Image (spheres, grey):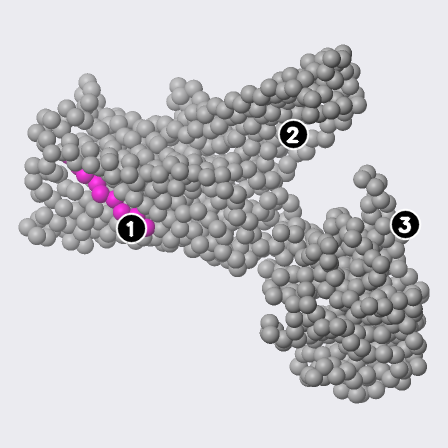
């Protein structure tokens, strides 16, 4: 009212209209419409994450009639979507678990892969009758892409991967690393990583504890160039124990894992620019097996027992009632993280798991 | 009757009035009678109007228009003209987390205000109303779990309606005192179920529901003092109280437990749950300001102390109350959890603004032009996020500029100068890296970087 009186006193009749117009503009400019739309979760996470089988009814990406396929690994490739994913692994005839060979299969679509074909069969005496654990070290500088694998007793062999996909064995006379030097007990699946000026091969001993053996990267490059000289290596203290993980038996009962198998280690660079090492394996207790994970910023160090992997409480793969999981491997395919793994139902094949949507 | 209660609460916070300025203003606060003070609005982040943001929001010692309703209520009484200011302002945050752009909402809306001067018993006074009305959301709330990552200061802090009503008086020649209230609302709601719960067949339960939601008014105070020490020097002191917006939601079941037609196992059993969540928090602030005029140049400086260390953990407190008679011993309520202190840092925020009268007179003294610039540095109050919480934030460098056109001699309708102001500003958030102690963190290391673009315009009338 004081305002109006003031305006009237100044004899500004048009001013009232001006004020009215302003108020109208104000109201027109105001919207009160809201919504209960869910918040978009676009926060990027580089952390360990859980996976679910891509298709619970048909989880397999690779199968071969009469054969069991396991221990998937992806060969290094150009970062070109047109280049098919070359999945390697171990396969053995059904009921003949000790007669393994390495296979490879070109995968252009996870639902349509070429049939697995024989890639490497045991030839050398030290290899025995069984090959397993293919794992690849990408080429760097003068060093070509290298394939590490295991013979029947767990000893480590080395091969060079040519650009046309041909494999040239570099350890025909003797293994690169004899099993006895890696630990006492059964030597489990290998997983290779390049870490600075060193190359590490992670593995399990006696299904109980994880280690790595460290090689000098330059010496390995010379070895790959057919130098037959000795290769120095160092073996780490245990990085992780099977009992670090709990395996769910019933809705309320969790028991420590009795054994670990199928170890896989990857190195990721966090947005902060530091390395983080993620370890995946299958932990088993009694009849239950689950894919588990653990993580470490250092990946372990030679000569120190304090730099251990820290186990993640929740399983890396949600309950796989469809079968028994084995040998996980993590890859990035079409910018999406994927988990390849062996999955045993009536037969064993390579299955695909994806992050839950 | 056996009653079991579990209460979850964050670490105790410090009192909102335990500050020197708070003590000085205690009397005023008591008069206001509501300790739930509030200041959580886009004005804190982006300023109000067009002249003030152009000057880096260093405006507490300059304010004499309706912007004083936010920057310094004492400034309302400086002039004798009736003032009406209407404008529009917008801010667009373009902030990346680990290189990925986040879907943040713009903060834009109508900025309008009015100043009504008067005189009673020889005392000059002025009433002012200052409004920011967003055109997307009048208010926006959401509740996230404590470990959910978020951009703490840009998430929904800037989606807020603001209405300030202030009164200022001239105590003595050149000395002004002002204060006022801003209004906000919070919601409190309960859902109540009453009847019988059938044990063996839940579908046979007969329960009547009632929903009750209240919108509760929150008022928060602010006070300002302004002293025109000389004709060219002005000093100011402003206090803004803290604000905490809670969401309160409850759920109550009052029922007999047992199958229909049979004696209830538990008669008049009761389960009550109330959750209180901190949706927004803004710290109390104390602003010391000065403005000096050197010929055609006006320089202003604000220094703001912001008490961010009182930031409560942004998580829900649950209060569970269970009464099921003799069966109470069979039920184990989950243990209470105390959230860690947020650990935010108190801040000193400097801001400087310069206004140059580039064209003092043109077109037969009908036109003048001001050129403005400002800078404001606001460090991040957010500490390292080493463990469970992931509150993303970075330091902020706010660089602004603007123009002010003053039109004079517009005739009988507008006998006083009409001001048309425009501004643009950019807030630069240099990259900040957050590292987690535990490599198993569900969020992991992350980086924050980005820009916030602002622009706006306002027309200011004087009558």
Per the image, label 3 sits on a secondary structure element best described as loop
Q: Does residue A302 appear to the left or right of B170 in the view shown? A: right
Q: Residue at x 92, y 68 (%)?
A: A96
Q: To which chain does the residue with label 2 belong?
A: B
- Eyeballing the image, is A221 above or below B243? below
Cα separation, mark 1 vs mark 3, equals: 71 Å
Q: To which chain does the residue with label 3 belong?
A: A
Cα separation, mark 2 vs mark 3, equals: 39 Å
Q: Does residue B243 appear to the left or right of A190 in the view shown? A: left
Q: Confirm whether the magenta stretch covers residue B460.
A: yes
Task: Point out the frontmost of discs 2 and 3.
Answer: 3
**Residue B11 visible within the image:** yes
> Residue at label 2?
B8
Which residues are the magenta region?
A: B455-463
Residue B423 is labelled as 1
- Eyeballing the image, is B295 above or below B7? below
Give whichever of B220, A48 is nearer the camera.
Answer: A48
Give whichever of B282, A129 is nearer the camera.
Answer: A129
Question: Principal SS element in the magenta part?
Answer: strand
């Amino acid at each position: 009212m004081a305002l109006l009186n003031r305006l009237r006193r100044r004899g500004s009749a048009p001013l009232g209209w001006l004020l009215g117009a302003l108020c109208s503009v104000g109201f027109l400019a105001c919207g009160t419409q809201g919504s209960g739309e869910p918040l978009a979760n676009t926060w990027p996470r580089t952390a360990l994450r859980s996976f679910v089988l891509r298709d619970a009814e048909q989880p397999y990406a690779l199968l071969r009639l009469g054969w069991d396929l396991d221990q998937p690994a992806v060969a290094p490739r150009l970062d070109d979507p047109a280049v098919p994913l070359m999945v390697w692994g171990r396969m053995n005839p059904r009921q003949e678990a000790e007669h393994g060979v390495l296979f490879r299969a070109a995968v252009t679509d996870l639902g349509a892969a070429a049939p697995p074909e024989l890639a490497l069969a045991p030839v050398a005496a030290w290899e025995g009758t069984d090959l397993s654990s293919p794992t690849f070290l990408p080429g760097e500088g003068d060093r070509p892409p290298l394939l590490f694998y295991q013979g029947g007793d767990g000893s480590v062999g080395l091969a060079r991967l040519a650009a046309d996909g041909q494999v040239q064995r570099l350890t025909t006379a003797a293994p690169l690393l004899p099993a006895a030097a890696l630990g006492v007990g059964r030597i489990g699946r290998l997983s290779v990583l390049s870490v600075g000026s060193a190359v590490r091969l992670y593995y399990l001993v006696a299904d109980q504890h994880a280690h790595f053996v460290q090689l000098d990267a330059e010496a390995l490059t010379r070895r790959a160039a057919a130098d037959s000289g000795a290769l120095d290596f160092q073996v780490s203290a245990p990085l992780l124990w099977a009992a670090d993980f709990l395996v769910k038996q019933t809705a309320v009962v969790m028991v420590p894992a009795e054994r670990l198998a199928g170890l896989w280690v990857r190195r990721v660079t966090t947005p902060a620019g530091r390395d983080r090492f993620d370890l995946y394996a299958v932990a088993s207790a009694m009849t239950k097996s689950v894919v588990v994970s653990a993580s470490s910023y250092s990946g372990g160090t030679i000569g120190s027992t304090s730099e251990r992997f820290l186990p993640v409480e929740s399983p890396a793969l949600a309950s796989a009632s469809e079968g028994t999981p084995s040998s996980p491997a993590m890859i990035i395919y079409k910018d999406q993280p994927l988990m390849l793994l062996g999955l045993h139902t009536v037969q064993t094949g390579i299955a695909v798991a994806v992050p839950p949507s | 009757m056996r009653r079991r209660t579990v209460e979850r609460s964050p670490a105790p916070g410090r009192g909102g009035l335990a500050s020197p300025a708070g003590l000085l203003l205690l009397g005023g606060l008591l008069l206001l009678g509501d300790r739930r003070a509030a200041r959580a609005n886009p004005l804190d982040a982006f300023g109000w109007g067009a002249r003030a943001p152009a000057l880096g929001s260093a405006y507490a010692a300059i304010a004499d228009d309706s912007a004083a309703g936010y920057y310094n209520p004492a400034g309302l009484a400086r002039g004798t003209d009736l003032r009406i200011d209407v404008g529009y302002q917008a801010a667009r945050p373009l902030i990346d987390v680990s290189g990925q752009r986040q879907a943040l909402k713009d903060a834009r809306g109508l900025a309008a205000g009015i100043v009504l001067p008067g005189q009673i018993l020889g005392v000059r006074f002025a009433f002012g109303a200052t409004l920011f009305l967003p055109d997307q959301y009048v208010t926006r709330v959401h509740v996230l779990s404590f470990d959910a990552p978020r951009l703490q200061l840009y998430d929904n802090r800037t989606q807020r309606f603001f209405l300030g009503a202030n009164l200022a008086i001239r105590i003595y020649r050149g000395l002004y005192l002002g204060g006022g209230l801003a209004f906000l609302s919070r919601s409190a709601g309960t859902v109540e179920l009453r009847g019988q719960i059938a044990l063996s067949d839940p579908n046979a339960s007969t329960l009547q529901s009632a929903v009750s939601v209240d919108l509760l008014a929150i008022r928060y105070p602010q006070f300002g003092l302004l002293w025109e020490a000389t004709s060219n020097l002005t000093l100011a002191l402003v206090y803004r109280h803290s604000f905490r917006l809670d969401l309160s939601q409850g759920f109550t079941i009052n029922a007999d437990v047992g199958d229909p037609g049979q004696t209830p196992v538990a008669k008049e059993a009761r389960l009550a749950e109330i959750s209180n969540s901190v949706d927004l928090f803004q710290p109390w602030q104390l602003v010391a300001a000065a403005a000096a005029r050197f010929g055609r140049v006006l320089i202003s400086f604000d220094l703001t102390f912001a008490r961010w260390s009182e930031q409560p953990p942004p998580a829900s407190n649950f209060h569970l109350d269970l009464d099921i008679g003799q069966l109470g011993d069979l039920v184990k309520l989950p243990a209470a959890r105390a959230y860690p202190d947020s650990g935010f840092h108190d801040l000193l925020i400097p801001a400087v603004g310069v206004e140059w009268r580039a064209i003092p007179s043109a077109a037969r003294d009908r036109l003048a032009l001001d050129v403005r610039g400002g800078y404001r540095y606001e460090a991040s109050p957010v500490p390292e996020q080493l463990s469970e919480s992931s509150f993303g934030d970075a330091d902020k460098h706010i660089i602004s500029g603007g123009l002010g056109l003053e039109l004079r001699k517009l005739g009988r309708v507008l006998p006083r100068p009409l001001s048309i102001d425009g501004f643009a500003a950019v807030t630069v958030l240099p990259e900040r890296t957050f590292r987690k102690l535990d490599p198993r963190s569900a969020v992991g290391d992350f980086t924050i970087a980005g820009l916030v673009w602002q622009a706006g315009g306002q027309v200011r009338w004087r009558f």
